[in-house]
Amino acid sequence: MAAQRELPAVPRQVLPREAYVDDAWFERERHELFANTWSFAGVTYDWKEPGDFKTVQAGPYPLVVLRNKEGELQAFHNLCRHRGTELLEGCGNTGRSIVCPYHTWTYELDGTFRGMPKEKICFPDIDKTKLNLKPAALGVFKGLVFVHPSAEPDESFETWLADLPGVAWPHDITSSELKEGSADVVYEMKCNWKVFFENAIDGYHLAYLHKNTLGGPVADKNLWETHGRHLVWYSTEQDGSKNRLPKLVDDHLAASGAKKVKGAEEPGYGGVYMLFPDIAITTSPYSFSLSKLEPIDANTTLLTLRAWSVRSWLSSEDKIKDIPGYDPESGRIKSSHWKVHPLETEDFQTEDVWVCEKMQRSLHSPAHQVSTLARGAGGEAPLTFFQQSVLDFVPLEAMPAAAE
Ligand code: FES
Ligand SMILES: [Fe+2]
């Protein structure tokens, strides 16, 4: 993206309905968007020792991030150079080398090919210098690790970050003061990933859908700022200056005796950072949480939430069981397991999932239409901004039927 795109003065729906429900659209997003942008892989301390690895899917590309013998993080395509078998699964430690389970071709931790069995008999004239693991790109920002399937991406990590490094940032999650909860919370949502993303950047709904939980702010008292393709949110309802939290939540937390993170009084950082395309970061003087969206198909999205605080009160296995929709069998949060109406749960995330799943159902109607969007940085202008970013990767012209 050359120049910074601004929020539009007159926002409008620019993505067609098909973009949210169509399998062909979903496939295009996998191959044209997620394959060509930066995906969140983890936090630097997820890889403590040499050999520690974690796999991550970026669109159609299975990748793996490893800590090598020198202690550096490197990213590779998770494919054996023999016949392309998936090398590593999930996360763990691979020891001093990477060994393919199929025919035991072996690689150093820096991706260099080491050897194969029966080389002289089976591969007498092979050029081993051409068998190193295919590299992917890796970038680190504030302890967050991102990967890109291309070793030399068209959009470099610095370009993708844009001016975010100069924007006030809440907490250092790799510091000893902040503790991560003992378990991730996984929501399985029956909606397109963009429906959830758009709901998260819709300032217009906060005072209405969440009247009992967040209680605002109203459209002219909240503010979204753009940085590259990313969006940062502030509430201005308390005294007009930028703040992190809706007043109702701030008052509630202060009354609960929760302990603030050191340096939390420092002004100017945002309450929500939406990193395009798959990350939502929510912050407060008490906590930091990061949600990664993982699109499964056009109608299903996984949201994995990691949370940090001074005491790990946000996500522990016991706490997760109390989240509305907890399914003991899968350990995931699902609408099929809600026991009371979402609006009676006093949980704003449940309210959001409820409205996103409603929206997804209505998007399947050929009569579905968006008439107009609320103006302003605290209205629905961020939705148009986000949709334009999607269209940068998945242009409408390439799908004329959908552009009608
Ligand atoms: S596919 Fe990996 S060793 Fe054969
Ligand atoms: Fe919401």
Image: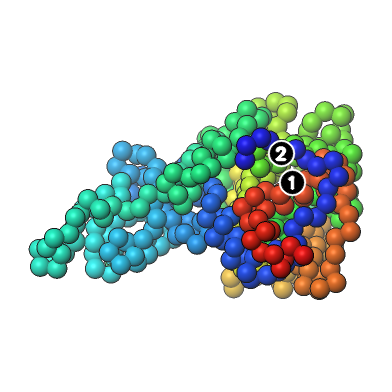
* Coloring scheme used: rainbow
| Separation of residues labelled 1 and 2 (CA atoms) | 8 Å
Q: In the rendering, at what x and y percent does residue 43 appear?
A: 51, 44
Q: In the rendering, at what x and y percent does residue 275 appear?
A: 64, 45
| CB at disc 1 and ligand 2 closer than 8 Å | no
Q: What label sits on residue 270 in the rendered view?
A: none
Task: Give the residue number, with chain letter if any, for mark 2.
Answer: 5
- Name the residue rendered at 80%, 42% in the picture: 8
Q: Could you tell me which quadrant the C terminus lies in?
A: bottom right
Asked if disc 1 and disc 2 are in contact, CB closer than 8 Å, the reply is yes
- Name the residue rendered at 81%, 73% in the picture: 366
- Name the residue rendered at 84%, 68% in the picture: 368
Q: What label sits on residue 385 in the rendered view?
A: 1
Answer with left or right where residue 57 lies relative to residue 236: left
Which sits in the foreground, 66 or 179? 66
Answer with left or right where residue 246 lies relative to residue 150: right
